[in-house]
Amino acid sequence: MSDITTIQLSKETKEKISSFGVKGESYDDILNRIYSMAVKVQLREFLMSSKGFIPIEEAIKEANKKWPK
């Protein structure tokens, strides 16, 4: 088992976290599960984002300008 630490939470935050748990599940289990879900959502948003990308037709035109046949 890894090192254990203590974090301070408001009662409201603790209740919110516990609402994601099932009987017998520790806060560590709950938070690790929430973290795993958040990572998947973040990755999906990154992969589905069009930010910084150009349409394939435009990319082909640019490539043909840089490297004419």
Image (spheres, rainbow, N blue to C red):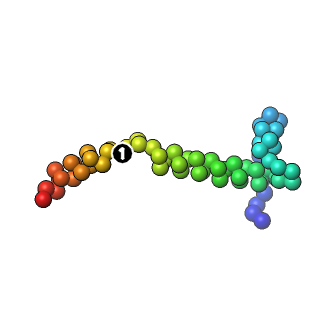
| Image quarter of the N terminus | bottom right
Tell me residue 45's x, y (percent).
Answer: 51, 45
In the rendered view, tell whether residue 14 sits above or below residue 33.
Answer: above
64 displayed left or right of 10: left
Q: Which residue is mark 1?
A: 53
Residue 6 seen in render:
no
Mark 1 residue crowding within 10 angstroms, few (<14) / some (14–19) / many (20+): few
Residue 3: name its quadrant. Answer: bottom right
- Toward the right, the furthest residue is 24
**Residue at 56% over, 47% down:** 42
- Please provide percent x and percent y for residue 32: 71, 53
- In this image, 47 relative to 26: left or right? left
Which residue does the image show at 78% across and 38% down from the upper left? 16
Q: Nearer the viewer, residue 54 or 18?
A: 54
Q: Amino acid at mark 1?
A: Phe
Residue depicted at 18% across the width and 53% down the height = 64
Of residues 11 and 20, which is closer to you in this image? 20
List x then y, in percent, for residue 56: 30, 48
Residue at the extreme left: 69
Dot 1 falls on a residue whose secondary structure is: loop
